[in-house]
Image (cartoon, rainbow, N blue to C red):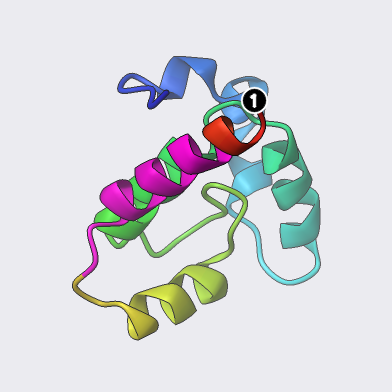
Amino acid sequence: MWVEDWAPAAACKKAQPDELFVRGAEQNKAKQVCAACPVRTECLAEALDNQIEWGVWGGMTERERRALLRRSPAASWRSVLETAKSQHSLASV
């Protein structure tokens, strides 16, 4: 199920913003915060659809998100990720 108001449920809600907007190897630590986040998919869709350039969003760095955007620049990432999330939920039942 897609969470419209996802930010209050985010695992990073309690983290300091400076922990998520880092460079280099520190990004791996930031991605760990996202690993078990219940709204990781929604967060990633937000970053991709709005082309947010800085920080780790949905477990992906700026570079990783740019690579996805280059491959599918006109995609509705919310639609793509919402479909994938619902299919994954059905498969795991």
Question: Where does the N terminus fall, quadrant-wise?
Answer: top left
Q: Which residues are magenta?
A: 75-88
- The residue shown at (73%, 72%) is 24
Residue type pointed to by label 1? Val
User: Is residue 85 highlighted in magenta?
Assistant: yes
Q: Which residue is mark 1?
A: 93
Question: Where does the C terminus fall, quadrant-wise?
Answer: top right
Q: Quadrant of residue 34?
A: top right
- Using the image as rendered, state which of residue 88 and residue 23 is in the foreground: 88
Q: Secondary structure at mark 1?
A: loop
- The residue shown at (45%, 36%) is 86
Q: Tell me residue 73's x, y (percent).
A: 25, 77
Q: Quadrant of residue 3?
A: top left
- Horizontal side of residue 25 vs 56, given as left or right: right
User: Is residue 8 highlighted in magenta?
Assistant: no
Q: Vertical placement of 78 versus 17: above or below?
A: below
Q: How many marks?
A: 1
Is the magenta region chiefly helix, strand or loop? helix
Q: Vertical placement of 1 versus 23: above or below?
A: above
Q: Tell me residue 9's x, y (percent).
A: 52, 17
- The residue shown at (37%, 41%) is 82
Q: Vertical placement of 31 versus 14: above or below?
A: below
